Image (cartoon, rainbow, N blue to C red):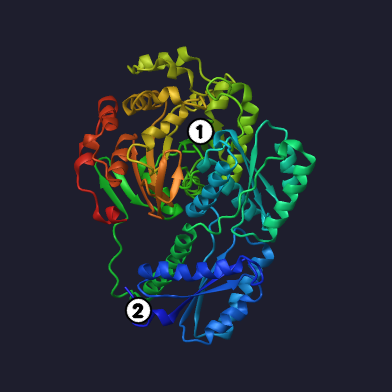
């Protein structure tokens, strides 16, 4: 665990966007010491932890530590966002300190504004404010007051945080306003929100009562004077006294220290003595478990899947159901797949109620079509914020929204579909599914269709991914009373599309995979979970069944004792070898 002199070799410098003369500075120094005590059992030694200001005086703080007996200094910036000048200053100060003290290793990390613990801090403070003012979350709107002082990427993180906080607290609507940026300026956001018949709560996206907090406070106070509906809008206090702050700091300290140790061990490994690399591809039954870390490896997997044949285009059913971190087809995974394809791609997905940012004052089940302009706007915003729009544009990939095709009456006549089904001897349990196939898919029958799903549950894989080909934005009726009902719907969709296209399943854990845990750090509407980072594996098969069997088993599911897979076995067939053969230990360990 600990080094012989670990507590005198490593120093942590926690640099906050505070000044020593500010009232919150003493709280910050207290957090630094509590973080030292909390991280000691995890590190194996008692670290030396100092508080510093995130400005030009950071160099003096580093220089002071360098005069003591330390071999390394680990710097943790603590601010919800940094502007370009602050980032430049941080990089310059660290570089100068490294040049001045070459014998001391100096490393730093970066804050994740969407960290689940941060979301919990703000959600707890928000909940307290709601209770103090007698407000009901489901009938109250949220205005996130962010500084906006950073670049476009940091403001995008503020939008992401708004979504996470709104989803966590279950509020009626969510809006954002910036104190130091005009799009949208906080005052303009107040003016827009005042037009709605809702009480609003203002949550500053700041950890302390900093100058930006004071700016937001003054803007709200002035707005209240001139707008009677806003007189009762409360502002939540920053979460500086949340006890979880200590856990958050301790976790960051531990992670930074361990990451540095991992890099050192990797550099020390001798190539001559290193173990041979493990196999990167395993064939189990009629499916494949493959390590995929590059475009060339993905291209080889696809080549092996469809026997090297080239097609006019490839259809890809992605998983885009919401913003919850790690649960949707992310830009990096999609970029890897699209870059490996030899032919143009058509990405398929339908609208869903979980991809909006809130503020939808209509019934999704009965009024979605008449509000399609708003839904389409939310769709475009989702693709922009997640970076998926950029990936689609980079690869010139076409995006076909199943819902829009259905609303535009651009689907194939059901009698034509039924005729093909009858010719192939395929009978559906739910014949109404024949109404939902877009014309563009019908025109390219015979091209491959890949169900590209996330590792996010033992049954939420490539088969369940086909559920998104139902056009209704709210698919509650299709879920039915239990999991076997939904399984039969998914199997019908696979039969339907399997008549028109050769189907391929790829369940990916390329950059993130989900491990469900009621005490997990991340939260979605389905519950809490943790993330497995960069596992780099996929399961794949011709047809979807085997890919799901392997992916489910890798997540610990006994597929022979699953109600979902019982339906799959009876409706789509089975792969006994994939269900029962030993799995490679290398993959299980990852």
Of 374 and 263, the residue lying toward us: 374
Residue lying at 65% horizontally and 33% vertically, measured from the top left: 198
Residue 29 percent location from the top left of the image: 54, 70
The residue under label 1 is: 349
Q: Which residue, given by chain and number where applicable, does mark 2 sit on?
A: 3
Depth order, front residue of 288/520:
520
Give above or below for 319 relative to 145: above
Say left or right for 250 vs 582: right
Where residue 241 appears, as percent x and y from the top left, is 53, 59
Residue 392 visible in the snapshot: no
Relative to 19, 185 lies left or right: right
Q: Quadrant of residue 138?
A: top right
Whether the residues at callouts 2 and 1 have beta carbons within 8 Å, the answer is no
Along the viewing direction, whichever of 464 and 234 lies nearer the viewer:
234
235 horizontally vs 267: left or right: right
Image location (x, y in percent) of residue 117: 48, 54
Give the vertical position of 148 relative to 370 (above or below): below
Please give the name of the residue rendered at 47% of the width and 64% of the height, measured from the top-left corner: 252
Image quadrant where residue 233 sits: top right
Q: Name the element at disc 1.
A: strand
Residue 278 visible in the picture: yes
């Amino acid at each position: 665990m600990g080094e012989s002199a670990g507590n005198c070799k490593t120093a942590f410098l926690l640099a906050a966007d505070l000044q020593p003369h500010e009232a919150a500075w003493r709280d910050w120094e207290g957090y630094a010491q509590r973080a030292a005590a909390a991280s000691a059992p995890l590190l194996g030694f008692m670290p030396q932890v100092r508080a510093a200001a995130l400005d030009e005086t950071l160099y003096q703080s580093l220089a002071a530590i360098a005069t003591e007996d330390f071999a390394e200094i680990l710097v943790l910036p603590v601010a919800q966002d940094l502007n370009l000048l602050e980032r430049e200053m941080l990089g310059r100060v660290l570089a100068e300190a490294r040049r001045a003290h070459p014998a001391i290793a100096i490393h730093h990390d970066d804050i994740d504004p969407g960290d689940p613990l941060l979301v919990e801090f703000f959600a707890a403070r928000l909940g307290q404010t709601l209770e103090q003012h007698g407000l009901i979350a489901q009938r109250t709107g949220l205005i996130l007051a962010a500084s906006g002082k950073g670049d476009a990427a940091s403001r995008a993180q503020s939008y992401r945080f708004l979504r996470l906080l709104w989803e966590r607290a279950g509020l009626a609507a969510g809006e954002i306003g910036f104190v130091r940026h005009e799009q949208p300026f906080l005052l303009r956001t107040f003016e827009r929100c005042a037009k709605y018949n809702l009480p609003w709560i203002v949550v500053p996206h700041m950890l302390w009562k900093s100058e930006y907090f004071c700016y937001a406070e003054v803007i709200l106070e002035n707005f209240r004077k001139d707008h009677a509906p806003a007189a009762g809008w409360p502002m939540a206090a920053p979460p500086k006294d949340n006890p979880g702050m200590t856990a958050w700091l301790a976790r960051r300290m531990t992670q930074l220290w361990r990451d540095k140790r991992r890099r050192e061990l990797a550099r020390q490994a001798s190539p001559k003595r290193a173990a041979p690399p493990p196999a990167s591809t395993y064939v189990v039954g009629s499916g494949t478990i493959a390590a995929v870390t590059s475009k060339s490896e993905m291209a080889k997997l696809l080549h092996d899947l469809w026997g090297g044949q080239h097609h006019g285009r490839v259809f890809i059913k992605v998983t885009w159901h919401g913003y919850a971190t790690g649960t949707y087809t992310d830009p990096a995974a999609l970029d890897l797949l699209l870059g490996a394809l030899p032919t143009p791609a058509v990405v398929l997905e339908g609208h869903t109620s979980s991809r909006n940012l809130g503020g939808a004052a209509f019934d999704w089940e009965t009024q979605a079509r008449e509000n399609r302009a708003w839904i389409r706007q939310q769709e475009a915003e989702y693709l922009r914020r997640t970076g998926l729009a950029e990936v689609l544009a980079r690869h010139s990939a076409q995006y076909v929204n199943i819902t829009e095709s259905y609303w535009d009456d651009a689907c194939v006549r059901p009698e034509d579909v039924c005729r093909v089904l009858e010719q192939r001897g395929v009978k559906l349990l739910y014949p109404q599914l024949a109404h939902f196939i877009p014309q563009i898919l019908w025109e390219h029958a015979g091209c491959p269709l890949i169900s590209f799903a996330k590792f996010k549950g033992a049954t939420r894989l490539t088969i369940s991914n086909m559920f998104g080909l139902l056009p209704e934005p709210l698919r509650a009726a299709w879920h039915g009373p239990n999991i076997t009902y939904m399984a039969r719907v998914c199997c019908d969709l696979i039969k339907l599309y399997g008549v028109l296209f050769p189907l391929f399943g790829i369940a990916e854990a390329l950059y993130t995979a989900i491990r469900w845990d009621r005490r997990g750090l991340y939260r979605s509407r389905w519950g809490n979970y943790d993330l497995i980072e960069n596992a780099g594996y996929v399961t794949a098969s011709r047809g979807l069944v085997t890919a799901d069997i392997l992916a489910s088993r890798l997540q610990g599911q006994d597929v022979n004792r699953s109600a979902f897979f019982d339906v799959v076995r009876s409706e789509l067939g089975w792969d006994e070898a994939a269900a029962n053969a030993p799995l490679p230990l290398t993959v299980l360990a990852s």
